[in-house]
Image (cartoon, grey):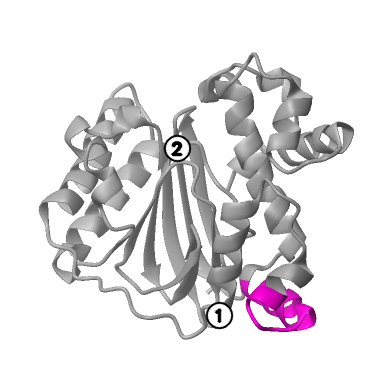
């Protein structure tokens, strides 16, 4: 089957994408300023989220909280998936207050027919919109999330066979503000630098230092928006960048705009580019 892609940005705070016929595909680690709902309809996907890997199967729903770094990797077989990104406007209050305690991977075979119908309805509203589509998108998204909250999750986390990369990422996330060297992390994890570098690239699709930069930039963006009185040079240093000019260069390269442009602004006041995009 040829790959098909249905994509729509129905509004600034709602994004929908459906892709069919994926083979040998992977996304680099990234994050969003919105909740992401990922639904696998066909195939098997290796999903990295936070600092763990998960095996996702058809019918599985993945809820990725705002700001969570994640990526996907598919094998040689054919895959189909649906992705929705939505702001809190589409999430019922009863779901918002429960989100921190909801498992990110949701598996309940009895709800697969309902999920399929709801995503089909969402697709119709984003591809054939009319004046009622916005309200219907809120209804369908709310129903989807409420079903997740109401019904039992059958998913059980399995022990990971290889903890090397999750442990390395956990270390990076806890020490990003300091100088971090691959050789030191490798020594801590009792492997050679070459093995850690090679395995990291294979599993994540990007290098060790590239992931570290993404995580540091994410933290810097949050501080730029939430601490407008802090100098950019200080934010850069606190987030692990010793050179303010280098920080500004990497930030603009990743996001498409300078650190000054978003200083003190809320997430909906700047273009969604770079690391905040799928």
Q: Is residue 4 above or below residue 237?
A: below
Q: Quadrant of residue 133?
A: top left
Range drawn in magenta: 187-203
The residue labelled by disc 1 is 75
Does residue 115 appear in the picture of this structure?
Answer: yes
- Residue 119 rendering spot, x and y as whole percentages: 31, 51
Q: Residue at x 53, y 69 (%)?
A: 166
Instruction: Point out the frontmost of discs 2 and 1.
Output: 2
* Secondary element at image label 1: loop
Q: Quadrant of residue 199?
A: bottom right
Left or right for 236, reference 153:
right
Q: How many marks?
A: 2
* Label annotation for residue 34: 2
Residue 189 as seen in the image, left or right of residue 245: left
Number of the label disc, if any, that sits on residue 14: none
Q: Is residue 24 above or below residue 228?
A: below
Q: Is residue 201 magenta?
A: yes
Q: Is residue 237 magenta?
A: no
Q: Position of residue 206 (x, y in %)?
A: 71, 64
Q: Earlier in the sequence, mark 2 or mark 1?
A: 2
Residue 56 locus on image (x, y percent): 39, 72
- Per the image, label 2 sits on a secondary structure element best described as loop
The image quadrant of residue 81 is: bottom left
Q: Give the Cα separation between the discs numbered 2 and 1.
A: 27 Å
Q: Residues within 10 Å of mark 2 (few under 14, many from 20)?
A: many
User: Residue at coordinates 65% horizontally, 74% vertically from top-left?
Assistant: 188
Out of 169 and 103, give the one closest to the viewer. 169
Give whichever of 192, 250 is nearer the camera: 192
Front residue (pair 184, 31): 184
């Amino acid at each position: 089957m040829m790959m098909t892609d249905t994509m729509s940005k129905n509004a600034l705070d709602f994004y929908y994408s459906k892709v069919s016929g994926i083979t040998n595909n992977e996304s680099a680690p990234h994050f969003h300023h919105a909740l992401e709902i990922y639904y696998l309809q066909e195939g098997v996907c290796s999903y990295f989220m936070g600092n763990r890997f998960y095996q996702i199967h058809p019918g599985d729903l993945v809820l990725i909280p705002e700001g969570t770094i994640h990526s996907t990797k598919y094998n040689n077989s054919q895959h189909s998936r649906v992705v929705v990104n939505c702001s809190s406007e589409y999430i019922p209050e009863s779901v918002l207050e429960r989100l921190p305690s909801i498992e990110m991977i949701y598996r309940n075979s009895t709800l697969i027919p309902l999920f399929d119908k709801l995503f089909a309805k969402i697709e119709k509203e984003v591809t054939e919109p009319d004046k009622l589509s916005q309200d219907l998108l809120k209804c369908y998204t709310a129903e989807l999330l409420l079903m997740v909250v109401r019904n039992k999750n059958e998913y059980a986390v399995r022990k990971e066979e290889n903890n090397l990369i999750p442990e390395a990422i956990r270390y990076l996330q806890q020490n990003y503000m300091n100088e971090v060297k691959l050789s030191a992390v490798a020594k801590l994890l009792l492997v050679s630098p070459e093995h850690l570098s090679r395995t990291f690239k294979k599993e994540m699709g990007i290098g060790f230092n590239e992931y570290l930069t993404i995580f540091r930039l994410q933290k810097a963006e949050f501080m730029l928006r939430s601490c407008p009185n802090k100098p950019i040079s200080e934010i850069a240093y606190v987030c692990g960048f010793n050179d303010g000019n280098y920080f500004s260069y990497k930030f603009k390269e990743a996001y498409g705009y300078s650190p000054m442009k978003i200083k003190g602004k809320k997430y909906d006041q700047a273009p969604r580019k770079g690391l905040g995009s799928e």
